[in-house]
Amino acid sequence: MQMLSSPPSSSPLVTFAFGLGIALGLSCPVYLLGRAIIRAVPSSEVLKVRGVAQEEIELDRVDWTITVEYMRPTVEAAYAEVNEGVDRVVEYLEKKGIAAAALRVGPHQQSTERRYVKVDKLGNQELRLEGYRVSRQIQLLGYPDIDRLESVERGFSADLRRTGTQARPGPLRYGLRDSADELKARLLDLASRNAFRRAESIAKSSGAHLGRLRAARQGAFTGFDGSGRVRGGDRRHRIGALVTVDYSVQ
């Protein structure tokens, strides 16, 4: 290995210049490395928080579906029974103050009923036709008088049973007349404010300073159906929204 040495005929000035060159040569890489490290360290950190908003609202519309269904040995008898049953249901609802114009009567739905029966002492079975099942639905959609319909629904089954009508009421489903877009916008605003308050509280308790907004992502809504409408099984209904927000902290 070859060692560095000063020139053979060195004066004090030459020796000083030689040493300074070595010092500068060694210090430059260290200086450049230090600058690279400083540039690689971010000047601020990111604080990720979630904002939540929840609201309880009162729904102002209601849907109701009633199914009239009969099974008879012939298809003609089944159709006749269903039509008579639909007429009795419509008449009953009109007497309770629900106009026939508000009702939607659907088409006939038909199916056959078959079952296996024993045909001999050996236990052999045969598939035989039992009858024809026919049904129709009566619907109230977006009905505004919720109090009236709730009162009708409570006594419906017992009253129709006394007339011999085979009518099966479905559950009441509540909704909103107006679009859900305004509700969603308000929930996002409330959730964003909630996220800011949380981030501010965390930064303050940590002795840091909350900086600018870096990113915002919309999360899920709750209380809305697959088509984005507000619907539920109760008149009082809870809706909500979740957002995720990134802030810089220093």
Image (cartoon, helix red, strand yellow):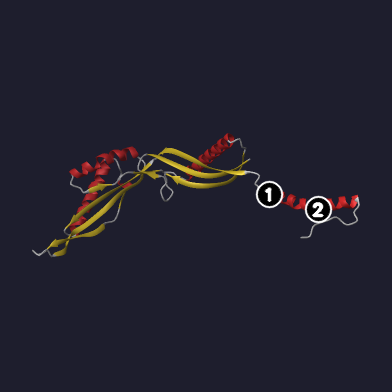
Quarter of the figure that contains the N terminus: bottom right
Q: Of residues 240 and 177, which is closer to you in this image?
A: 240
Q: Amino acid at mark 2?
A: Ile
Secondary element at image label 1: helix
Q: Position of residue 85 (x, y in %)?
A: 22, 50
Residue on which the image places disc 2: 22
Q: Residue at x 30, y 53 (%)?
A: 106
Residue on which the image places disc 1: 37
- Local crowd at mark 1 within 10 Å, few (<14), some, or many (≥20)? few
Of the two numbered discs 2 and 1 on the same chain, state the one appearing first in sequence.
Answer: 2
Q: Nearer the viewer, mark 2 or mark 1?
A: 2
- Local crowd at mark 2 within 10 Å, few (<14), some, or many (≥20)? few
Q: Of residues 84 and 110, which is closer to you in this image?
A: 110
Quarter-wise, where is residue 237 in the image? Answer: top left
Q: Residue at x 37, y 42 (%)?
A: 61
Q: Of residues 117 and 228, which is closer to you in this image?
A: 117
Whether residue 210 sits left or right of residue 55 in the image: it is: right
Q: Position of residue 21 (x, y in %)?
A: 83, 53
Q: Amino acid at mark 1?
A: Ile
Q: Residue at x 51, y 47 (%)?
A: 218
Q: Of residues 234 and 241, which is closer to you in this image?
A: 241
Judge whether residue 186 can be spotted in this image.
Answer: no
Q: Residue at x 45, y 38 (%)?
A: 55
Quarter of the figure that contains the C terminus: top right
Distance from label 2 to label 1 (Cα)? 24 Å
Secondary element at image label 2: helix
Judge whether residue 17 can be spotted in this image.
Answer: yes
Whether residue 158 sits left or right of residue 36 in the image: it is: left
Q: How many marks?
A: 2
